[in-house]
Amino acid sequence: MRRHRDPRHVEGPNLAPMVDVVLVILIFFMASVAFVGPEWFLPAALPAAPLDPSTAKADPYALPDPTLRVRVSMVDDRPVVMGLGPGTVTLASFEAHAREQLQGIDIRTIRVRLGGDSGTTWQHVVAVQDVLTRHGVRQISLESP
Amino acid sequence: MRRRRATGEAKGHPNLTPMIDVVMCLIIFYLLVGQMASDQRSALALPRSGTGDDHADALAAFVNVRLDGNTLALDVDGVPVSLDQLGRAIRAAPSVHLRADAALTYERLWPVLDELARSGVRAVRVAAEQSTGAFGEF
């Protein structure tokens, strides 16, 4: 006796498990690309011609350097910032200090040479660069420790 | 008169072949993009920053700097290089993206910046992890 074929029967292998696996793989790759993703980029200039300070001659007639030198140092294992306005401030309060010091100044003309002393980390230097950039300072260059 | 369905496509069972084709193409796309991204960017704890722009130049050289034990480990687009070879490795790149470990001391990082400057690089783009900008922990 011949069996009647089910009209819903599809010839060939069942593709549903493969589709499930393939979709899981797709979601995995989409998620992994998203994790590689978000990064900021902050522009920073490098010194044009690194000079050996011991050989640099002091010019007695030179005008004062219009560039601000902002330094990050470690005092009692805490990062402090100096060079923007009088005195030294902790990195934690640098945001408010920078806002106060840069108020009313034409920021486009300001150039900042930023550096870190012994013991400061790259995170500390980037944190200062972040604050200065947020307040509109565009010309920041990194200088030697 | 009712039309008969095409052979192999029964009622309630759509043809999955085009969907599988598209999904396979998407998988290959994400696989390649993920591979290229991980080649350029090694896994580093980047410094956090609340500002910056998120435009990464695809043709830029990604210089990755981290500490491996007590020695400075450098790579350019995933290819390990020494400090002496750094200038040659980035020569053809139109710009340089610097990805350095946040915990590196500035003193340890400076030779890399100095070498880049000596190689004619006038500016770098400092890579940072996006953050809301809380500085309380410093």
Image: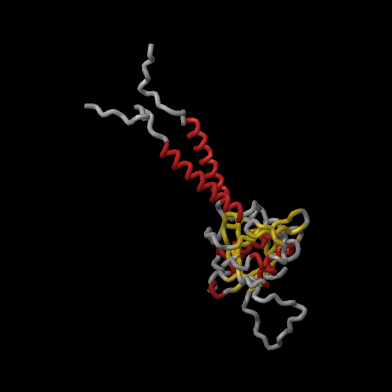
- x and y percent of residue A56 in the render? 73, 81
Color theme of the render: secondary structure
Residue B88 relative to residue A34: left or right = right
Name the side, left or right, on which B72 lies relative to B15: right
Q: Residue at x 56, y 49 (%)?
A: B34
Which sits in the foreground, B4 or A43? Answer: B4
> Quadrant of residue A6 in the image?
top left
For the view shown, which residue lies furthest in the top direction?
A1
Q: In the image, what residue occupies the spot 75% across and 61% down?
A: A119
Horizontal side of B19 relative to B28 (left or right) equals left
Q: Quadrant of the N terminus of chain A?
A: top left
Q: Nearer the viewer, residue A104 or A113?
A: A113
Residue lying furthest front = A1
Q: Position of residue A65 (x, y in %)?
A: 65, 80
* B56 displayed left or right of B11: right
Quarter of the image containing the C terminus of chain A? bottom right
Residue at the bottom extreme, as displayed: A61
| Image vertical order of residue B119 relative to residue A22, above or below | below
Tally the numbered discs: 0
Q: Name which quarter of the figure residue A46 lies in.
A: bottom right
A56 up-or-down from A89: above or below? below
Q: Position of residue A138 (x, y in %)?
A: 56, 69
Which x, y percent locates residue A35? 57, 47
Can residue A93 be seen by looking at this rendering? no
In this orientation, which residue lies closer to the viewer: A139 or A95?
A: A139
Residue B94 seen from this side: yes
The residue lying toward the viewer, choosing from B33 and B21, is B21
Quadrant of residue A8 in the image? top left
The residue shown at (63%, 66%) is B90
